Amino acid sequence: MRQPSLRLFTTSLVMTAALAACGGGSDDTPAPGPLPEATPASLTLEKIGGYSTGQFGVSAAEIPAFDAASKRLFVVNAQLGAVDVLDLSNPTNPTKINVLDATAILAGAEINSVAVFNGIVAVAIQAPVKTDLGRMALYRGVVSLPFDTSAMSATELNDRALEMLVKTGISKPGDHVILTRGDHMNAHGGTNTMKVMEITDEHAKS
């Protein structure tokens, strides 16, 4: 009776050893991943450029909104009730290139907030009487570039306007723009003109 018991004990011991050999020597253990980067304990900022309205303490620069697509900064100028548009294509030298004025939408109104996303600018417009209903306006790709046209012909004016769009970095050759202007009063035809025009390589040479 003792011999069968010994044989059973030997078989169990061999099976245990076989299982240990199969599970203990695997090379499939994944390598540890990289350690997460530690959060810095401090942050150092360095000024590389700036823009000044020339006015201090009068809320001439309140809420900023940056548009990465056009590299423009839109800043609420509460003193003027408008939005100053700054060109940040060269961040060391921000340049004011335009103003969004709410009075064209609502007489006597003021802009008191701005937000921008993917080239679309939204502004909140406060009515002259604060308890009255205000407005909200969207701007997209509308740029005002004032320059002296008194000594230009109608054809020359068109080319100079397109050249300025290229020079200021707003447009590039191949772009199509809508140009609106008032014709000279002593010229034949209407006093207002709107044209769709293409910017060519010639406009980039000036």
Image (cartoon, helix red, strand yellow):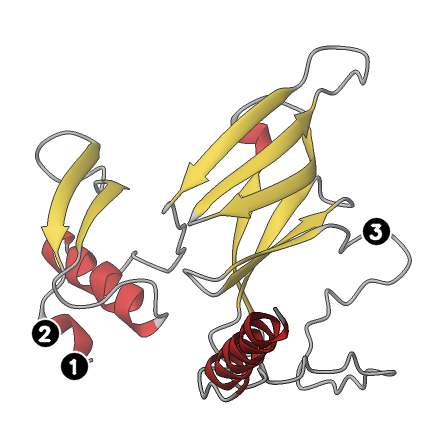
Q: Which residue is drawn at 10% across and 74% down?
A: 201
The residue that disc 3 covers is 59
Q: Which quadrant of the figure has residue 66?
A: bottom right
Q: Residue at x 66, y 84 (%)?
A: 35
Task: Give, as a three-letter code, the residue at label 3.
Answer: Ser
The residue that disc 2 covers is 201
8 and 111: which is toward the camera: 8
Q: Residues within 10 Å of mark 1 (few under 14, many from 20)?
A: few
Q: Is residue 132 above or below residue 41?
A: above
Instruction: Give whichever of discs 2 and 3 has the lower sequence position.
Output: 3
Q: Residue at x 37, y 70 (%)?
A: 168
Task: Give, as a three-letter code, the residue at label 1.
Answer: Lys
Q: Is 76 positioned to the left or the right of 26 in the image?
A: right
Task: Give, as a three-letter code, the residue at label 2.
Answer: Asp
The residue that disc 1 covers is 205
Q: Position of residue 31 (x, y in %)?
A: 53, 86
Judging from the image, what secondary structure is the residue with disc 1 in?
loop
